[in-house]
Image (tube, helix red, strand yellow):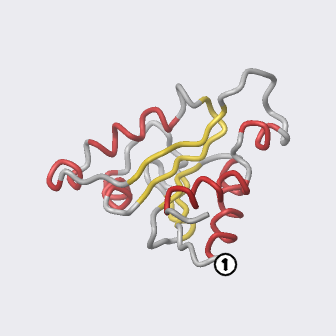
Amino acid sequence: FVPGKDEIVRDGTMGYIVSFGDAVYRALDAVVSLKAEGINIGLINKPTLNVVDKEMMERIASSPLCLIVESLGKKTGLGSKFGSWLLMTETAQNTGKLCKFDSIATHHEGCGGLWEQAYGQGYDSLSIQSKIKSMVGKK
């Protein structure tokens, strides 16, 4: 662990899932399953949520897509800030191009902290796989 540095868990050529905490292992399961189907998506662990790793942001911005997967709220979690950070990259500023971007996060009211929450909130492996497939144009 290096404070402020994001970690590549799996490299990918078709884009990246960015995740942290308890959502990482669910995202890793999705990445492994997708690669078995020929969809080469990478996984980045973001252990320091409030610090922008500029080198990693450039890597993500120049990739085809980015999906944030988190167990925090959709309106206030990492995904709500990450898109703005992508807009500030040199890649976006100099080329005007930006990767496809979306996020999966908690969005229903209720008690959290249980493993079942991932399925009810849609950040389980199958939901992640489905979202990535729609982003790359495969069913």
Residue at x 69%, y 51% (from the top left corner): 127
**Residue 54: x percent and y percent?**
31, 51
Q: Quadrant of residue 99?
A: bottom left
Residue drawn where x is 66% and y is 33% of the image: 106
Residue at 71%, 42% in the rendered image? 122
Look at label 1 and name its amino acid: Ala
Which quarter of the figure is the N terminus placed in?
bottom right
Q: Residue 46: where, in percent of width, then height?
A: 52, 50
Residue beneath label 1, please? 36
**Placement of 135 over or under 113, stated as above or below:** below
Q: Nearer the viewer, residue 106 or 11?
A: 106
From the top left corner, tell me how far across and down residue 117 is, in percent.
80, 37
Identity of the residue drawn at 26% across and 49% down: 89
Quadrant containing the C terminus in the rendered view: bottom right
In the image as oriented, which residue stretches furthest toward the top? 109
Q: Secondary structure at mark 1?
A: helix
Q: Is residue 138 above or below residue 118?
A: below
Residues 85 and 75: in front is 75
